[in-house]
Amino acid sequence: MTPGGSDAPHPGASELLNQENLMNRTLAIVKPDAVASGKAGKVLAHLEEAGFRAVALKMIRLTEAQARSFYEVHEERPFYADLVRFMTSGPCIPMVLEADGAVPALRGAIGATDPAEAEPGTVRALYAESKERNAIHASDSDENAEREIGFFFSHQAILEVDS
Ligand code: CMP
C-alpha cells in the first residue's frame, strides 16, 4: 500500500502531471537524517530561496514495504537493504516542488549523491553526512517524478493548495 492509502499510485496525480505540469513538478524527500538532526526547515528554506515552491508536503514514517517499493529500482544494488533500513529509521518529509524545469533544477540544487562530491552550496554539501545519509532525495527524470509524486500524494492533495 502506498503512503497515500491506496494499493496503486494515485492515478489523479498522473493525470494532473500529464495535463500541464509534468515539466514543472518534482518530488523531494527530506530524509530521516536531516529530519532527526533538525535540518528539515533549513533544507526547505534553502529550496524556497533557490526558487522552488512547495505545493504538497507531509511528514511520514515509511514502512519497510513502502521503502522497498519506492526504491525498487535499486533492488539488485548492494546498498538496497541498508537504504531501506535507513529510510525506515525515522520520519521523513516527502514534498512536491514546483519550478521551471523542476527535475533538473532540483537535481542541480541538491548536488551529487555523495556529499564529498557535491558542489559547494548545494543541499547535500551543506547538510548531508554521507552517501547513504545524504539528507534529500530528488526524482531523476520526469517519468520518475510522475511515479514518485503519485506514490505519496493524491491529485486532491495537490489541488487543494494550488487553487
Ligand atoms: P537517492 O537520491 O535517494 O537515491 C537512491 C539512494 O541510494 C541515494 O540517494 C543514496 O542515499 C543511496 N545510495 C546510492 N548509492 C549508494 C552507495 N554506493 N552506498 C550507499 N547508499 C547509496
Image: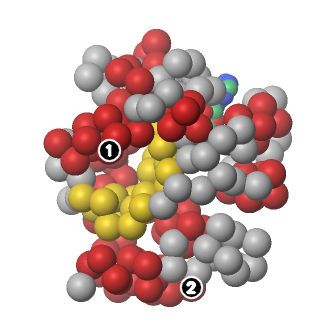
Which image quarter has ligand 1? top right
Residue at left offset 65%, top offset 67% = 3
Q: Is residue 125 above or below residue 44?
A: above
- Amino acid type for the residue under numbered disc 1: Leu
Residue at left offset 51%, top offset 72% = 153
Q: Is residue 28 visible?
A: yes
Q: In which quarter of the image is the C terminus?
A: bottom left
Horizontal side of residue 2 vs 102, given as left or right: right
Horizontal side of residue 126 vs 99, given as left or right: right
Residue 17 locus on image (x, y percent): 40, 77
Residue at left offset 60%, top offset 68% = 151
Residue 13 locus on image (x, y percent): 48, 80
Q: Reading the chain from its start, which is encountered first: label 2 or label 1?
A: 2
Q: In which quarter of the image is the N terminus?
A: bottom right
For mark 2, what is the residue? Answer: 11
Looking at the image, the residue that sits furthest to the top is 116
Q: In this view, does 116 lie above or below 29?
A: above
State the CA–CA distance, disc 2 to disc 1: 27 Å
Element type where label 1 sits in the image: helix
Q: Is residue 144 above or below residue 130?
A: below
